[in-house]
Image (cartoon, rainbow, N blue to C red):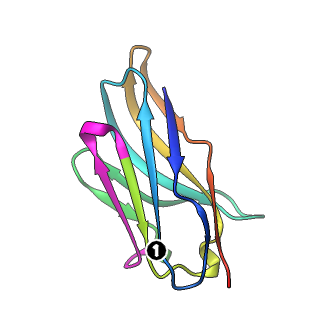
Amino acid sequence: VQLVESGGGLVQPGGSLRLSCAASGIIFSINAMGWYRQAPGKERELVAAQTSGGTTNYADSVKGRFTISRDNARNTVYLQMNNLKPEDTAVYYCNARELLTTLGYVEVWGQGTLITVSS
């Protein structure tokens, strides 16, 4: 089982980006999927997460600017990021928790994708 991310890159302040993360492998169900980020010299922090039932959780710093969504049938999670700020610069990691596989429940991380917000 692995998570494959796409959509990172360089964007100007005020711009938008959309991240995608697809889980592949033998997967029976996934409870929560979400996004974390880690800026240089800082700890990894939750950006946004969504359960299979649709409950969402956002970091205060991104509320009103970022939107998380899921396609449960495709085991894919998206993060639409609008009005990006320089302080959003970080490596963004996809996360899947309580992912049920043939080995039982596991937690999986993506490889990370860099987002740089700069003029």
Comparing 107 with 2, the one in front is 2
Furthest toward the right, the residue is: 41
Residue type at mark 1: give it: Val
Magenta region includes residue 66: yes
State which quadrant residue 65 falls in.
bottom left
Secondary element at tag 1? helix
Q: Name the residue under label 1.
A: 62
* 44 part of magenta stretch: no
Number of other residues with Cα within 10 Å of mark 1, as a class: few under 14, some 14 to 19, many 20 or more: some
Where residue 20 sits: x, y (%)? Answer: 44, 52
Please tell me which residue is depicted at 34% across the width and 38% down the height of the picture: 75
Task: Tell me where residue 91 appears, x and y as whole percent.
Answer: 65, 58
Q: Residue at x 52, y 57 (%)?
A: 7
**Magenta-drawn segment:** 62-76
Q: Left or right of 17: which side holds 113?
A: right
Q: In this view, does 44 lie above or below 101?
A: below
Quadrant position of residue 78: bottom left
Q: Which of 43 and 25 is in front in this view?
A: 25
**Image coordinates for residue 106, horizontal then vertical, percent:** 46, 27
Please give the count of numbered marks on the rendered protein.
1
Residue occupying image coordinates x 33% and y 53%: 50
Q: Residue at x 40, y 75 (%)?
A: 63
Residue 115 higher or lower than 31, as above or below: below
Query: Does residue 25 appear left or right of residue 70 in this picture?
Result: right
The C terminus, quarter of image: bottom right
Q: Is 23 left or right of 75, judged from the image as shown?
A: right
Given the current orientation, which residue lies at the most extreme left position?
53
Q: Where is residue 43 in the image (x, y as percent from the top left)?
A: 68, 59
Q: Considering only vertical position in the picture, is 110 above or below 29?
A: below
